[in-house]
Image (cartoon, rainbow, N blue to C red):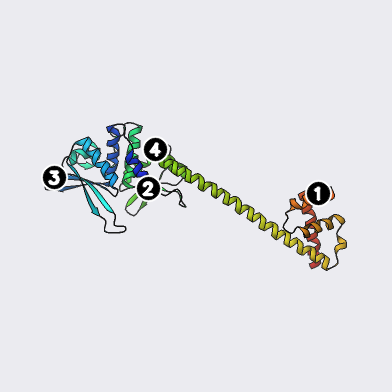
Amino acid sequence: MSFSIEVKEEIVRYEFANPGEKKALLSSLARINGTISMRSGGVTLEIRSENAKIAKLLFVIIKELYNVDARILVAKKMKLKKNNVYLLQVNNKGIEILEDLQIYKNGKLDHNPNKDILRNTGDLRAYLMGSFLASGSVNDPASKHYHLEITTHSDKHADFLIKLISKFELNAKLIKRRNVYVIYIKKSEEISDFLRVINANNCVLDFEEERINKDYWNSNNRLNICELSNEVKTIKSANNQLEYIEKIYAHSKEYLLDEKDKKIITIRRENPEANLQEIADIFNSLYGTNVSKSGINHRLRKIKEIANNIEE
């Protein structure tokens, strides 16, 4: 089961506090996935879903709110995965229901609901819950990228959803993809907050746990990469220093070195993978003097200069 389906099925299990929240959820679902058609018996309202549990929730809500003759039809998609498609079909009171949901007004479709549908915070949350059930998706938190989106066919409705999401201090963005408008969030923290808004609290816990684990391992990987890079640099520098030392002795120029230089050369030869601080610690331990890391670096730079002068 994908993470998107887990979120949707948790929303379906949510116990709504009052009929107003159910109406808000139904309004957003019908606005995104609903169609109306004229038939011999009158106007028919259909709301489409690819999830049987969502279709069942719609059936229960619309029967409870409007006491209408409703049924669920099942069809199979002919493309891609060929999943089942569930159609909630209402053959009577279709126009009255759309008018009550603020979708059909004065003989034409309206893109956005008004305050009669969204009266309080609970209604706002329910409307976003319905929008996600209708066309929402969210990447699995274990995947490489974070991404949550909701699609709609109306640019005005997309702008409305952006403003509605912003009421919860979330920064959603909008793009057009072919013939639909996509409202999306990419920041992991904001995706987590959006899941809280739509009352998918168990999924929030799963999302946060996976996100923390991934961030921890990414942080460790960055540290490991930095440590490995430093080790490579240390080994490369040490090899160069050993080459400089061999060149000095090969050309009998060791008389240009003082006793402290020669002691450091001995330590470097015996500890080819040691970094500057480790050489300083070994020197201080052996000779009881206080030589700093920068002091060791100064001596090794002197050795490099002597070797370069031999080449010249």
CB within 8 Å, label 2 to label 1? no
Q: Residue 4 carries which label?
A: 2
Q: Earlier in the sequence, mark 4 or mark 1?
A: 4
Measure how far apart labels 4 and 3 are at the Cα level: 38 Å
Provide residue 211's location: percent of width, then percent of height.
Answer: 48, 45
Estimate how packed mark 1 is, as few (under 14), some (14 to 19) or many (20 or more) residues with alpha carbons within 10 Å. Answer: few
Q: Which residue has dot 3 on it? A: 42
Q: Is mark 1 on a helix, strand or loop?
A: helix
Residue nearest the viewer, comparing 85 with 107: 85
Mark closest to the chain's N terminus, 3 or 2: 2
- Tell me the element at label 2: helix
Q: How crowded is mark 4: few (under 14 residues within 10 Å), some or many (20 or more)?
A: some
Instruction: Identify the amino acid type marked 4.
Output: Val
What amino acid is at disc 1? Ser
- Tell me how far mark 4 sits from mark 1, CA to CA: 62 Å
How many numbered badges does the structure rendering display? Answer: 4
**Label 4 close to label 1 by CB (< 8 Å):** no
The label nearer to you, 4 versus 3, is 4
Q: Which of marks 4 and 2 is nearer the N terminus?
A: 2
Cα separation, mark 1 vs mark 3, equals: 97 Å
Earlier residue among tags 1 and 3: 3
**Residue at the left extreme of this rendering:** 40
Residue on which disc 4 sits: 197
Mark nearer the N terminus (2 vs 1): 2
- Mark closer to the observer (3, 2): 2
Looking at the image, is 184 positioned above or below residue 257? Answer: above
Real-space CA distance between mark 4 and mark 2, rounded to the nearest whole angstrom? 15 Å
Residue at mark 1 = 285
Tell me which residue sits at (23%, 53%) in the image.
75
For residue 57, side relative to residue 40 (left or right): right
